[in-house]
Image (cartoon, grey):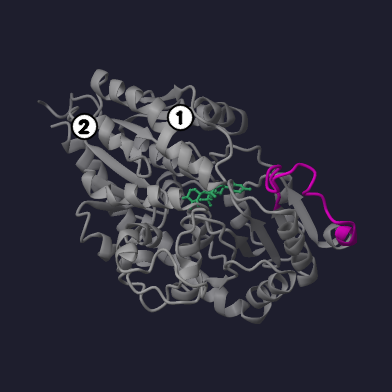
Amino acid sequence: MDKITQSPSHVLIFPFPAQGHVNSMLKLTELLLLAGLDVTFLISANDHNRLSSYTTVHSRFSIYPGFKFHVINGLYDGPMNTGQNLSLMMADSLPKVATPLLRNLLLDSHVTCLIADGIMGFALDAAQGTGVPVLFFRTISVCAFWAYFCIPKLIEFGELPFEGTNMDEPILNVKGMEGFLRRRDLPNCLSNQALQQISSITCRTPEAHALILNTFDDLEGPILSQIQKHCSNIYTIGPLHAQLKARTLSKSAFSNSLFQEDKTCIGWLDQQVPKSVLYVSFGSITTLTRDQLIEFWHGLVNSGKPFLWVIRDDLVSNTGENKVPSELEEGTKERGYIVGWAPQEDVLAHPSVCAFLTHNGWNSTLESIVEGIPMVSWPFFADQQVNSRFVEAVWKLGLDMKDTCDRKIVEKIVKEVMEVRKMEFTESALRMANLAKKSVNEGGSSYSNFNRLIEDIKMMDV
Ligand code: UDX
C-alpha cells in the first residue's frame, strides 16, 4: 500500500486510574499526537470530569482530529492509599469492568496497538487472539521496576519475607544494587497481597511487545542493562514532561491535574528570596496521621526556612485534622504558605525554590531532577522507597528520611540540604538536570528512542 495515503496509526492508551498514571500517560499521548498518530485514551468517568473541571486538556487536545477520550463508567474511584483498596482495584474491579470493554475495542475498531499501563496485566489477556500488539508503559523508575521484578528471587533466597527486625540488613539478590540496598529500601505496598500482585504483574512484562519507560539512560543506565536481559525491546523516553516541552518549544507546563491548582502560590514565591524556599508535597495518594503532620509542621517551622506546603483536603484521613496547631500559627504565618494543590511543575521551575521535601513518586522525582532541585525524601509506599534510596545513595541528589518522622530529624535534614550541604547538592542536581535536558533534545537518547518508538508503531500497520 502507498504509505503516503495510508491513514495514521491508531493507538489505544489505557492508564491505571490514578493521578501519577493519568498524568504521565497523557503526556505520552500528547507526544504521539504531535508525531501524527491517532490516539484513543481510556479514562474513568471520574477522572474525565476532573480533567475537564481543572485543566485545559480538552481544549489542548481538540486541535488533534485523531484524538478521542473513551470514558469508562463503573470504575472504583475511591482512595487508593491502602494495600486493600489497591489490591482490590488491581485484582478485581478494574479487570472485571475493563477486560470485556478492552477486548471489544480491540476487535471492533482499527487499532494498531495498545499501550497499557504495565500494572494492568489483564490487558495482555484481553488482547490475546486479537492480533493487536500490547506495549507496556510503566510510570515508575527503572530501579523500582527492577526491584519488583526481583521479588520472586528474594523470596527464593529467603530475603523476603523478613526474619528479624533489622531494617538495615543488606539485600543481596537485586543485581546491581548489592552495595547499598537495605530491607528498608524495598518496595512497601502496605499489604503483602498488593506487593505480590505488583511483582507478579511486573514479571509478565516480557510477554508484552515492548516496554516504554519514563526515564533517561544517563540516570538509570546500569539498572536498565539488567532489565534488558529479560525484555529486549525497551524505549526509555523520559522525562516525558521535559520531552513534551522540548518538542513544542514551550516554557509552560502541560497540566493534567485531577485537583484544582491554587496558582496564588506563584505570587507568594515571587516575593521570596531566590533559592530560599522549601517546597513540600507528598503527591496525590499519600496520607499522614495527625501525629506525623504535627511532626512535619514543627520540623518545618523550626528549620527557619520559608516553605510552600501542599496539604490536600484528604492528606490527613479525618477532615479537620489538617489545621495548624495553635503554637505554630505565628511561625506558619511568618514563613509558610499552604495550598490544597499546587501547579507543581511551575513551582519547581520557580527561581525562589531551593529544595523539595517529597514522597519521591516518580513524576515528582523527575520533575525535581529536570529543574535541578535537591530533595529531602520521605517515601510513603510502593516504588517510592527504592527511589528515595537512589536519590541519596546513588544520584547524590539529597537526603533520605525514609521511615522516620520526627520533628528534630525533619529540622536537621532540611537544614542539611538547604544550608550545610546546599552547594554540594545543588551542584549535583544541576549536573543531572543538564543530562536530563540533553536526553530530550534533538540527538539525545530519549529523543531518539521516542523516534524509534514511532517508527516501530508505524511498522505495525505495514
Ligand atoms: C504514584 C507513585 O508512587 C508514582 O511513583 C507512580 O509513578 C504513580 O503513582 P503519586 O503519589 O501521585 O503517584 O506521585 P507522583 O508520581 O509524584 O505524581 C504526582 C503528580 O501530581 C506529579 O506529576 C505532580 O507534578 C503532580 N502534583 C502533585 C501537582 O501538580 N500538584 C501538587 O500539588 C502535587
Q: Is residue 78 magenta?
A: no
Q: Position of residue 399 (x, y in %)?
A: 57, 73
Q: Which residue is mark 2?
A: 128
Looking at the figure, which quarter contains the N terminus? Answer: top left
Classify 78 as above or below 329. above
Q: Residue at x 70, y 64 (%)?
A: 277
Q: Residue at x 57, y 57 (%)?
A: 380
Q: Is residue 108 left or right of residue 23?
A: left
Q: Which residues are magenta?
A: 310-329
Q: Is residue 318 magenta?
A: yes
Q: Is residue 118 left or right of residue 427?
A: left
Circle 2 SS class? loop
Q: Main secondary structure of the magenta part?
A: loop
Nearer-the-camera pick, 122 or 395: 122
Residues packed near mark 1 inside 10 Å, few (<14), some (14 to 19) or many (20 plus): many
Q: The disc labelled 2 sits on which kind of residue? A: Gln
Q: Which residue is mark 1?
A: 43
Q: The disc labelled 1 sits on which kind of residue? A: Ile
